[in-house]
Amino acid sequence: MARAGCRILPASNEAQEPFSMSSSPRRIAAFVVSCLLPTMALAQGAADCVAMADPAARLACYDRLHGRTDAPLASSPAASAAAPAPTTMPAVTAADDDSRLGTRWDLDGQRGALFAPRAYKPVYLLPATWTDQVNREPGSPSPQHSVGSPLVLKSIEAKYQISLKTKFAHEVFGTPLSLWGGYTQSSRWQVYNGTDSRPFRETNYEPEVMLVAPLRFGLFGGELRMATLSLNHQSNGRALPLSRSWNRVIGGLAWERDDWTAEWRVWKRITEDREDDDNPDISDHVGRSELRPARYWGEHALAVQLRHSLRSGVRSRGSVQVDYVFPLAGALHGQLQLFSGYGESLIDYNLRQTKAGLGVTIAGWR
């Protein structure tokens, strides 16, 4: 379609001549009409285009109105299907895949399934452990908590530990806090003691409930990643005179830098009535604080656990434990454990010993 424009409409009895302001009124009127008619037609056509519901048809209408002859885009299901889908940018999250503590405890915005079991402390089996001090006469300052005759025990036994945790709640009371539960059980088995029917010498049960607060605080070239507050119970489920137990409120901080982590915990024992207390001096032996630095490289890990009573003089006691994990086959890893000090188990809380064990671990060490 040719573009509309103003032109002179000559009268039938007038010769066409150049237009000027001195032209006759008839010629001026004809000029005005020639300018208005195309404009009115264009306006009417635009109104018709606007009234069209189909986007492709409306675009074609505008093209025709303005003299464009290119074929409009087809308005068909095939054409719509061929059109590329709009690109959706991936959601940006705060998760840090390189953070070991962040992955363990959902510290970077993760919302793992609630009540799903997860690894907590290392899960291992040490078929052989050896001690330099066999606790054949376990005792406690509490009345009726000491054996009357020596137990038949060997210095070599097996040890295993299972440990799980689960998340109970995200964002407790609308805060960044999360609520967790944990359970750890460790057993010492006199499997090589055929004389006394291979008994389980000691099993410790440790349930706990934990509040976890995520942190991002720079320290020593790394970051404090979380603070914890937990209620912890530990007992051996035995009758007198071998019953041992305690309850604690534990506060903790965890730090991380590259392949290093460090966890520090300090606790206050919940006081019990004297007649119900199996082990009134347990804090002076097992300790009141714990520091656990660890280094991870490849399929290896080295962790050190240091405990102390935070007291001086004769009450200054504690322990050190070293765990080295190394690859064996697939997901199976070997574990070497060395311990020296007090509190390797609850029944041994006031016995000083050195102990070594070798075995395998399958979870919780990373």
Image: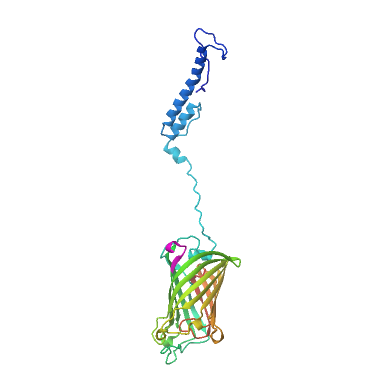
Nearer to the camera, 246 or 32: 32
The answer to whether 217 appears left or right of 200 in the picture is right
**Does residue 173 show up magenta in the picture?**
yes
| Image coords of residue 181 (percent x, y) | 43, 69
Q: Is residue 273 magenta?
A: no
Q: In the image, is residue 150 above or below residue 267? A: below
- Residue 39, compared with residue 170, is above or below; it is above
Residue 349 placement (x, y as % from top left): 48, 83
Q: Which residues are magenta?
A: 172-180
> Which residue lies at the image location 49% right of the left edge and 72% below the top edge?
251
The residue depicted at 44 percent of the width and 61 percent of the height is 174
Which corner quadrant of the image does residue 303 belong to? Answer: bottom right
Q: Quadrant of residue 274?
A: bottom left
Q: Pick the residue in front: 248 or 35.
A: 35
Q: Relative to residue 181, is residue 27 depicted above or below?
A: above
As drawn, the residue found furthest toward the top would be 13
Residue 172 visible, this orientation: yes
**x, y percent for residue 254:** 53, 69
Please say if 165 is above or below 151. above
Residue farthest left in this picture? 239
**Residue 152, position in %: x, y?**
44, 89
Q: 26 or 361, which lies in front?
A: 26
- Number of residue marks: 0
Q: How is the image coloured?
A: rainbow
Which residue ends up furthest to the bottom in the rendered image?
149
Q: Is residue 184 visible?
A: no
